[in-house]
Every structure is written in C-alpha cells, then in structure tokens.
Amino acid sequence: MPCRDARGTLRSMFRPVDARPDLVSIEHEMLRSWREEGVFERLRAQTTGGPAWSFLDGPITANNPMGVHHAWGRTYKDLFQRFRASLGHELRWQQGFDCQGLWVEVNVERELGYTSKRQIEEQGLAEFISLCKQRVLTYAARQTEQSIRLGMWMDWNDPAELLKLRDALAEGPATPVTIAGVDGPVSGPVEQLIGRLGTPEVGGSYFTFSDENNDLIWTFLATCHARGWLYKGSDSMPWCARCGTGISQHEMTEGYADREDPSLYFGLALVDRPGEELVAWTTTPWTVAANVAAAVHPTLDYELVEFDGRKLWIGASRRTATLGGGAPRAVLLETRKGSELIGWKYRAPFDDLPAVREALGPDGAAHRVIGWDDVGSEEGTCIVHIAPGCGSDDHKLGVAEGLPAIAPIDESGFYLDGFGALSGREWHEVTEDVFAHLTAAKSLLRREKITHRYPHCWRCATPLVFRLVDEWFISMGPLYEKPRDQLTKAEIDASLRYQIMSVVDRITWLPEFGYERELDWLRNMSDWMISKKRYWGLALPIYECASCGKVEVLSSRKELEGRATAGAAALEGHTAHRPYIDEVQIDCSGCGEKVTRVPDVGNPWLDAGIVSFSTLRYREDPEYWKRWFPADFITESFPGQFRNWFYSLLAMSTVLASSEPTKTIFGYGLVVGADGRAMHKSWGNSIEFDEAADRMGADVMRWLFVGSRPEENVLFGWEAADETRRRLLVLWNVYAFLVGQARSARWTPGEVEVPASSRSVMDRWILSRSAELASSVETSLRAYDAYAAVRRLEQGIDELSTWYLRRTRDQFAADAPERERHAAFDTLHQALLTLLRVAAPISPFFTDSLYRNLVGNDQTNGSVTGAGVSEVVGGAARPLAGAIRTGSAPGSIHLLHWPTEESAGWRDSELEQAMERIIRAAELGRSVRSAAGIRTRQPLARARVVLGVRGADAEALQNILADELNVKSVERVDDASGLFERRVKVLLPKVAKRLGASTQVVMQAARDGKVDFLANGAVAIAGVELAADEIEIQAVPREGQHVAEDDGLVVELDTSLTPALVVEGDAREVIRAVQESRKSAGLQREDRVEMEIRGAPSELEQHRGEIVSAVGALRCQFAKSGGAPLAGWERATVALSGGDAELFIRRATE
RNA sequence: GGGGGGAUAGCUCAGGUGGUUAGAGCUCCGAGCUUAUAUCUCGGCGGUCCCUGGUUCGAGUCCAGGUCCCCCUACCA
C-alpha cells in the first residue's frame, strides 16, 4: 500500500511540476534568471584563460527587425559557441551589425517620402547621413532584443543605451553622452562615441560604420593601390535610375525578373544603296536615338527582300520572324554574306538631333555596319542595333571599332539636352514618342511585345538601364587558360584571383560543394567594382588630381589629416563620412594642385569583409590578433554569400595577411514557408520572428532549425513546430514522472549510494547509452554536424522514455525493494541530467529550467570560484553528482562542463548491443502476436527464441523479454529445432556467367524451394548442379508457425491457451478497462475507487486481489449481469472470454 | 546562352562497383500497448523507379536521344 500521507506536502528537494508545460513562459522565466544571476557573465569568467576558440560573426544588416531566417543562422552561432564554452574554451562573444550602404538609404528615403537622389541633396547630406545612423541604431537595438529573446548569448549592448545614442544624435552630433564601457562609463560627443562602438574600451557588438572599420578599409585600398590593382574604369554599366547608382556584378544576380518590353523592328537607310534599308531590332526604344552602328555576323547569310514597297536587309534565318504574318508577300532580291555588308554607311532616324550630330558628324555620317562574332542567328534580325553609350557589349565594340558614344540620359534616367523633344523626359516614358518619331521617319517596320528576363535593382526593383560611367575597381588579375597546378609563381603573384583560390584551398567547406562554388565564382568574376555614387557609406579614400590625373589612395584618416591643406576643420569632431570628409583637400603629390576626394562611397561588402582585422585589433594589439585570427569557424546562409561576405572576407584577408580568414565555413540554406515557397506576406505563409517566439517558443524554433539538413531549405511552419514540440514534451514527461515519484518517495540524490556494478541491467544500459550520447554528440558538434547531433538526441529521448522508463516504471513504486528503488531514481536522474546537458546548447531555456529543479533550486551555488577551467563542475575531476550531493551544483546548466569524460565509465557497449537485440526481439514477438490475432494482454505459456545474447546479463535480458512479451517462459532454441526449413540462396555474381540464359529459371526454382540436396553440400536446381561455394543455405521460418525472423533473430510463440491463462488475460483486461475509466473520469493517481463488475466469469474472482491492488480499489463487487446502471458511476463495457462484462467505478470517499 | 544537379509511394527522400520479391520517415486505415506520455509498437493501403530506344542471362543502377524541374552564372540586341 502506498503511503498516502506523502502527497508532496512534505519537504522535497524538488519543486512540483505541471503535467503540461508552458514552454514560452519557461523561456521568459529563464531569461529573467539569466539576467538577474548574471549567468552569461559567469560563463565568460569561468572560461577566461581557456584555449581560444575563435568565432567570427558575419554582420547582420541593422535595417529592419530580425526575421525567422536570421534565427536559423543565429541558432547555429549560439549553439556552437555554447558547446565550445562547455568544453572550456575562451570565446570573444562579439557579434556585429552591418550599417552602411544603399539598403539603409533606401529605407530612410522611403520614410521621408523621397523619390530621387536630388531630394537628398536638397535636404542636405549631413541631416540625411544622421538619419541613416539613427536608423541603424534603432534596428540594432531591436535586433539585440530579438536575439536575446532567441537565447543567443553574446556581449550585447543594452538596447536602451543604443536608443539613447540615437536620440542624442538626433539632437546634434556634438551632444554629450555617457554610456557603459568595459571598465566603466565612457563619455563624449555622441557622433564620436558612435564611431567607437565595439572597440575594446566600449565593448558590445561591432558596427561596420565604426572608425576602426572604415579606417582599416582605407589601409586595404591603399595596399591594393600600391600593388597596382586599383583603377578607374569607364564602362557602360547597369544602372538604377531611381537609386542613381551603378550596380556591381555581385548585385546583379539577385535582380533578374521577367518583364514585358516593347519589341521593335526599325529600318536604317543605306547611304550608298538608295532605297535599301537594314532592319534592326531592339527591346529598349529609349536607346534608338543613341544608335551609332549596326553589327552583322560575318558568316551569316543576309537577304534583301522587297516588302510592301520597301527594300529590306534581314538575316536569312530571321526573315519570316521579322516580317511576321506578311512574310509570304516578301520577294527575295539578293543574298549576301554578312562580311560583304561590313562598312556600309547608313542614316538613322534620329540623325537630326543636335546630340547625334555632335557625336557622329553632320547627318550622323559616322553610322556604319560592323562585324561581330557574337551576333546570333536566332533572335531579332541578325542585325544588331549598337549604342555604345547604352550597353556593355556595345561599349566594348565601340572601343574596338573606334566608334563615338552617345550617352542619352543622366544619373536619374532623364534625357540630357540635345535630344529634341526627348530632352528632360524619363527614359521609360518615351516609348510612344519613339514609335511616333520612327513612324514619321518611315523607319518603323513592326512593333510587338516581348516577355524576357531583365535585370532589376536588387533593392528597389526598378528596371536597370545601362549608362556610360566612371567607377572604381579592384582588378582580379588575369584568368589563365590552364589548370591551376600548372601556374608559375609569377603568374599567381600577378593575379589576385589565384591568390584567393589558394586561400580557399586551405578552408574546410561545409557542405563540401561550397568549395567548388567559391572557386567557380572566383574563376568567373570580373573586376570588383567598389564604388557607388551614393551618400551613406564608407568614404572612398581616393584622390584623383583634376589637373595632372595622378591618383592617390590614402591609407588612414591620420594620413589624411597630416596631408590636409584645406577643410580639415570641417571634418574635426565628425566620423569619416560625407559630407564633412568631402571638405578636406590635399595637395597633389604630382603637380601640387588642390585635390578633393572622389565623391563615391564604398561597396558595403568592403565593410563586412574587413571585420577579421578591424574587430580583432589588427593594428592596436597584434598579439591579440594573432590569438584570434584566423577564426576557427564562420557560418552564414550560403545563397549569396559566396559572392558577397565569403568573397570579401577572403579577398581582404588574402591581400592583407596572405592567409585564410577562417578555418571552417559552414553554410546553410534558406528558410521558406511550410508550402516550400518563399515566405511572402500576401501568400499567408510568412511568420514573423516575434510571432514565432511568442507562439512556438525559441527552444522549439531552435530545435527545429538545428534538426534540419543545412544543405537544404527549411520548410518553416506551425505544423513542423508542433512536431518538434511533441519530441520535447516526451522529455518533459520523463522529467515530470521523476519529479512526481521523487517527491512522493521523498528521494534525494546521493542519499543511498548504489554502485553501478550492482545496478539492474536496465539501469546499466541507460547509463551506458547516456555516456554514448554525450560522446557521439560531442563528436558530431566538433565536426559542426548539428543535424546528426539532433538525430542522436531524439533517439536518446526515445530510448529513455519508451524503453527504459516504460520497462522500469515498477522500480519506482513504493513497494519496490529499497535498494532497487534508489538505484532506479539515481539512474533516471543521472541519465536525464546527461541528456539535458547534451541538449542544452540547442534548447537552452527548457534544459536549464529542468536542470535547476533536478539539482534542487535551493541548494545551487551561484558563486564563481575563479579556480580556473579545470575546476568547472561536470568535468572528470568534479562530477556533477558529487556537486549535487554537497549542494555545490552550479546554478545553471550552462555553467557545467560537457559530460563526456564524466560519464565515460558508464560505457558497456556489449550490453548496448545485447539490448538492441532484445528490443528487436520484442518487436518480432509483438509482430507474431499481431499476426496470430492474440493481444499482448493475453499471457502465453512460452516463447522460443534464437537471440545470440550471451554473457552475465543474458538471463536478466531474457526476463525482460519475457515480461515485455507477456509470456511465462522464454526458451532458447537452435536452428535445428524444426521451426525452420532450409532455403538455398544462389550466389548470383558467382554463377550467373556460367548459367547464362538459364539463370532466371534456376533463380525461380530456388525461390520456390524446388531443390535437391546432394552430397558435399552441393545442390541441384532445375537440372543444374551448384557447388557448395556457389550457394548459401539459410534457415527461414517454416510456413504456418507463429514465428518471426530478422537478421538471425527468431521469436516463436506458443499460442495454445489454458483456462488459467484465459482468466489471467481477463483479469488484465479488467484492470486495463478500470484504468481507462479512471482516466476518463479524471481521477488522480492518489484517488481510490470502488468498483462493480457485472457478468464476468466466476473464475475471475480468483484474481480479485491483483485487480484491487493494481487499480487502487477500496471495494470490488462481483455481480450477475443485467440490472439498472449505477447512477453517478463511470460505466464501461469490457470484452472478456465469456462475453461482454459491465464495469462501474466511482471515486471512493472512504 | 554556358555550367552543374535532379526526376523512385500522396508528401520528403535512401537506394557503392548492374543481381534475386525496390526501401525509410510522414500521411491515411486497421490492430496493439500504456494511470509519465498527445509518446510508442505491429500490420496494411500505396510504385509505369520521367519517356523512348540500346547493351546484358538480368537495368532504378550503364549508354544514346527526348521531356520537365532546381541551383550557379550571364546586360547578347
């Protein structure tokens, strides 16, 4: 009889727990505890002095609230940092914000309602830049809060202080302000203080707009210049007219989208062949006025046809397509090769415009036909409209052919002067005017619409145009037409491209395809465009003398201040941003003239790429830099980063240090909606981070992310979250069981010591599995394989719950032998704690909450001893169990050492293998019962098995199997027991050649068992004799037996039932039905019942004692069937051997 | 346009060098187990292995051609 006075009202070391946890409120509780107890600071203190493990955070753009896609990567970042800290490593714990660039500008513009660059300049740059900084601070604060909510442990700034800086900046750059620093408060004018965020004195996150970050990029650019790699290029570039800036190759890929454009065929009148016209084709009507030449392919055929009164030259392969429905009316006059057309002069429809005359001479005299091998035969007319001012290939051709260029539009997309009626109009508005003009000039042949892929601005989705502009580039060096291993040192020295590739070789790329993809990008990329004609960003330190053309690149602000000969005062007190820095002038070192900085700002990937220097104190503390560089690990979502952050990090590290910036790069995919499509608000598959944190909780989100395959996209949704939550709830149930039992038993860890060797086989097994769990998850996480870690953990949860606890539940009962009971409590306690410790880096809230209760809230010890890494609890030297006993367990699970060493002594791999076979045998047994139609509750007399389990534990394991299969005895048999028949497996690879065409016949006969066994182990099948070494004889269960077999394991059940067994089965059936009724009546475990059974076989009364004690009944009445139902009692029907019986129960009031 | 990868159960995917009756998880259906559990166990339904040819005793696997999808890359007018 259980002790009824121990209903948890007596003191227990464990706080009672709910049957169903509220995971989200647990997370808030833990966040509060971590903050109040300074748990993270304690972890930092206790790992100081450990071996360095260097993680370098790729900066998150502080421009919007964080999304769930950020949470995936941030979970990895946090998980590997926590894991490494538990191994005793010292970490830097610094994360970063990406601050500068067009994305911030675009949002600030939008808030202000601006539609063009002009409005920014009208407002004044100083004000605009300040707003950009304020926006960054706003979202840095917001993302900090969200990251903390995710459980990400970093050296965070107080969000309130970031907002304080923002507000002070809004008041003015010189507003004095004080914030917390590493060694006490730091004060200064707000703009200067903001420039120092993330420095060793101020601490906290790094910001790429910081002074040090910008200044080191200057050093990088000066180094490139010194090596002759920096140059100004003049080219026709993709250009966003809304943003007023060129778009680099790195940014192009993201902007391709289908777009409908006009498709326009127009004639160009030949000068020396009166009445004949070339037909050209374009999809960009706004470029027609800028036409300079027409390109043909030298070897293609071109035809002159008469068509509706016009004589037209068209590529032969495109005649029908060009003329459309009217094509049959065309009459062929002449055929020529393209090469014969080269040099012909023509007049274009816009030759009257002043701009055209100026560029091409009177009447556009310079128009001519040129040859070009890239002219295709399957598009347009095979005569390509060439406008060197409006296209990249056009520009290249123009340079090669010595053609002039006409640049028709300004940086905002408006036509310049000299284009007649078009001047002052926007490029995309003139389509109809161009048509009208071409029609009037009798040039227009046909117009249609075409849908094609067209580049768009990746920030604002505006279609791009091509403009002739000057931009600054870093040369990637030549691309050699031979394998890399055949390159000479001189060739590599001359090519940054190959130097970066050598660095790529030294990095471990996860997943592996990252390596090839990065190399592929490096092979294909053209020079790196680093300038942008914008406002908010790195001020490029390039000084180009207008007088003599000399280009100087300054390596630091200090150098600039030293050389400044005008405007230095304007910069004083400001960060090195526009507009102040634009005031500073230096004297040209070539001719002495005053030189001003080029107005461009830098590509933002420069900002992110320099962080392996700027945040690691490259200049001010070389020893520190050497300790932390290269990083051990970086991780980011790989789509995009091969050409962005990974690329810039590699390039800058190659130039400045000739070294890899990191030893390992771990990439992962994208977060998409549950339907597999990109998350999109209007598609209803989008989930905001805050919503996810509130509804599913951070632990579930993290578990879901980490359990996903990194090389594929995650399908993120509420159903997936529910599936994940169910797994964590199983763990909770184990915990709730342990705490509930421990409270009622008033069990305390370590009270009675039971040596491992004298524990039950189940106890020793789960401890061994726990040790294996710790070790194998450690191995996985060291290899950055978090996916494998989660799979193993989920297996661990399953083993703990569905095998260990289910099979050992009785050992926790009050009537279990004292020693066994203590051993069971201690085993479950240790196994659960080990599992929680291994899961802690993945789901840090839930695991810490459970841990705290399991070690006894009141007894935890919060002090940091400062004794050093080796003294941390949970290592081999100071096991957790001992610390719990002495009340010195750390206050948080995250302060423990990783449990591998501590648990290593529990391993017994032989036992693990044996148990695996028992578990499988139990499954086979259930399968046999299922096939025979005998429920498990019905006891059987005997099972016969082939187990292959030997050793000291064999008998105990066999008893477990007997209990699980509900049989009275388990008998071992061998394969000659008559349960089996011989089957011949033909070893195909050995005999197929010899058998040839008869192979199939022999196989079928062997399958049918038509085999004659001969002497010497040979057999005859279908008239063919096979030698002993050509076959394998297998034992398979004989048909009609109650047998199941798998991989040498065999289980056979004796299904014959005696009357005694039948009644015993009835008893269990009744017990089960009562338990079911108790549950549906909502009774608690402590509640007693009274019951009445009507219509049961009279023999069942023999089992009254067993029934009564199993269900906690005070009274149990047996009655005849029939009669009125008992009012207010729970009623159930139960099928027994003699037919249905009626069951009534109710709570006993004593 | 160039390069790479893929197509196997309703869904997500495994299936060295060709080999016997193509598997797993999820879903669905049925049964079983269980006063820690919404967990779990067993069984079933479910297949033109994208199509067409070829090589072979034998092809999901190898070869050729085709169709469709994904990724990387690219201003072709």
Image (cartoon, rainbow, N blue to C red):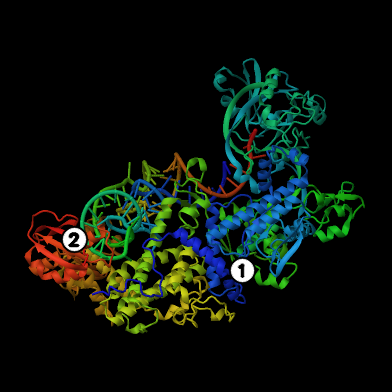
**Residue that lies at the very extreme toward the front in this rendered image:** A1150
Residue A163 badge: none
Chain letter for the residue marked with disc 1 in the picture: A
Label 2 amino acid?
Ile
A651 or A69: nearer the viewer? A69
- Quadrant in the rendering for residue A21: bottom left
Q: Residue at x 19, y 71 (%)?
A: A1109
Label 1 amino acid?
Ser
Local SS, label 2: strand
Q: Residues within 10 Å of mark 2 (few under 14, many from 20)?
A: many
Task: Give the percent coordinates (x, y) of residue A805.
Answer: 32, 70
Q: Residue at x 45, y 50 (%)?
A: A717
In the image: residue A149, left or right of residue A500: left
Residue A330 seen in the current view: yes
Q: Quadrant of the C terminus of chain A?
A: bottom left
Total numbered circles: 2
Q: Residues within 10 Å of mark 1 (few under 14, many from 20)?
A: many
Task: Give the percent coordinates (x, y) of residue A476.
Answer: 70, 54
In the image: residue A339, left or right of residue B32: right
A469 or A1121: nearer the viewer? A1121
What residue is pinned by disc 1? A54
What residue is pinned by disc 2? A1145
Tag nearer the camera, 2 or 1? 2
A550 or A110: nearer the viewer? A110
Q: Residue at x 50, y 78 (%)?
A: A873
- Quadrant in the rendering for residue A373: top right
Callout 2–callout 1 Cβ contact below 8 Å? no
Q: What is the C-alpha distance between the residues marked 2 and 1?
A: 65 Å
